[in-house]
């Protein structure tokens, strides 16, 4: 697990406004033999102030990126809800259409039944009219005109048959018509209920669509804001190039060839928790170099100079925290970051193995460790290539 934010934040923290440093060094009296330490201290204060804006830019970019991820997540939820709602609206619409078709068929059957009822009544009335035309004026007159008891029984049976046929046909038809009418009412109620649900689902769909459009606009705006902020950070990162120039200006002149003859020692004894390597920055969306190695050790462990040299930086550098940089001569320098306490001062000459500070977790760090760099002519190299094997 990495105990520190990898190199690009650390490199940002070293000298983001290195151009200011180089310019200041070029001014008369900026680095004289007697006043060099004081000038460098003043420059460090200026650099610390410049770093505040850089940290604010990085923090703002992080916030924008977080808001962008939240908006994207919300948009995905809305899109899923919209798909569900759209499917539900389609289902309810199909149900309404099916009920409407069923109701239309039921009403058609009801009308047909009513028409059949009229036909049945017409047929019964026609039979009675035939009886009347034969001298039987009605049910009562038919019975009264009986010539004998046997004739009365015959006439009564005929009347009962006619009445029974009339009542039976009409009753069955009326029951069927009532059943169809009741079914039609039920279907109408079901249609009304489905129409209400459909209206509610449609309204929900409209709200979801509006919310989706709003969040899509928010995502678009955040993408634009993130791009703009990345350009701001990119401009800040461009100052990283000044780090090389600044350290080179502070170092003793040389080609860096002496690095091969230097017998470095480990500044602390501990495991490498983060190597000298490239990593992908999720905020800058590009690969960045972790410019040193992180060595994990307990808090307040003494930090030893990996090689003899002159202290050219000793103070707070955002990202690195409490940092010491030694000019080891011949264009070679070493850097020791995240210290809890610095034990040396600018301009001081230290011997190899001398304690220059104590381990901490200042700056961009999530645990106690030393961020150690070796630079040749201001450019970082892999320290493992020059440290003794363990």
Image (cartoon, grey):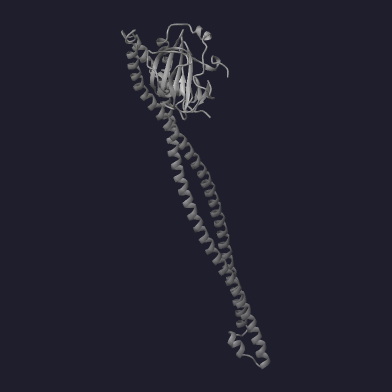
Where residue 183 sits: x, y (%)? Answer: 56, 64
Rendered position, 117 above or below 235: below
Q: Indicate the quadrant where residue 147 lies.
A: bottom right
Which is nearer the eye, 37 or 207? 37
Where residue 256 sits: x, y (%)? Answer: 49, 8
Name the residue at the right extreme.
150
Which is nearer the eye, 172 or 122? 172
Where residue 314 sits: x, y (%)? Answer: 39, 18
Where residue 187 sits: x, y (%)? Answer: 54, 61
Which is nearer the eye, 368 or 146? 368
Query: What residue is at 55 percent from the left and 54 percent from the top?
Result: 95
Q: Is residue 202 visible?
A: yes
Q: Indicate the quadrant where residue 30 lies.
A: top left
Screen quadrant of the C terminus: top right
Q: Is residue 382 visible?
A: no
Rendered position, 187 above or below 151: above
Query: What residue is at 49 percent from the left and 24 percent from the top?
Result: 6
Query: What residue is at 52 percent from the left and 64 percent from the top?
Result: 185
Name the residue at the bottom extreme.
148
Q: How many marks?
A: 0
Which is nearer the eye, 293 or 69? 293
């Amino acid at each position: 697990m990495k105990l520190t934010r990898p190199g690009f934040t650390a490199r940002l923290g070293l000298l983001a406004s290195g151009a200011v440093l180089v310019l200041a060094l070029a001014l008369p009296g900026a680095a004289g033999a007697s006043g060099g330490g004081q000038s460098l201290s003043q420059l460090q204060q200026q650099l610390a102030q410049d770093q505040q804006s850089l940290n604010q830019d990085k923090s703002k970019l992080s916030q924008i990126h977080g808001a962008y991820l939240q908006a994207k997540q919300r948009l995905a939820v809305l899109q899923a809800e919209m798909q569900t709602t759209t499917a539900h609206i389609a289902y309810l619409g199909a149900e309404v259409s099916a009920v409407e078709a069923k109701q239309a068929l039921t009403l058609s059957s009801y009308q047909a039944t009513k028409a059949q009822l009229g036909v049945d009544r017409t047929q019964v009335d026609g039979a009675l009219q035939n009886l009347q035309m034969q001298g039987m004026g009605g049910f009562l007159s038919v019975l009264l005109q009986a010539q004998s008891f046997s004739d009365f029984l015959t006439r009564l049976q005929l009347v009962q048959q006619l009445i029974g046929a009339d009542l039976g046909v009409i009753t069955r038809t009326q029951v069927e018509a009532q059943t169809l009418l009741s079914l039609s009412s039920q279907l109408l109620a079901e249609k009304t209920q489905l129409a209400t649900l459909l209206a509610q689902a449609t309204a929900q769909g409209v709200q979801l669509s509006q919310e989706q459009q709003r969040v899509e606009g928010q995502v678009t705006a955040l993408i634009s804001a993130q791009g703009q902020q990345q350009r701001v950070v990119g401009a800040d990162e461009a100052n990283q190039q000044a780090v090389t120039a600044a350290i080179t200006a502070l170092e003793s002149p040389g080609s860096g060839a002496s690095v091969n003859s230097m017998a470095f020692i480990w500044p602390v004894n501990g495991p490498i928790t983060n190597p000298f390597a490239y990593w992908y920055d999720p905020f800058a969306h590009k690969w960045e170099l972790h410019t040193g190695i992180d060595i994990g050790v307990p808090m307040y462990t003494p930090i030893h100079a990996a090689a003899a040299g002159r202290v050219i930086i000793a103070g707070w550098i955002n990202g690195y925290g409490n940092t010491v940089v030694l000019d080891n001569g011949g264009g070679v320098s070493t850097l020791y970051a995240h210290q809890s306490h610095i034990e040396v001062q600018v301009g001081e000459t230290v011997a190899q193995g001398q304690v220059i500070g104590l381990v901490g977790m200042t700056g961009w760090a999530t645990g106690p460790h030393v961020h150690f760099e070796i630079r040749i002519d201001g450019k970082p190299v892999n320290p493992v290539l020059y440290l003794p094997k363990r």
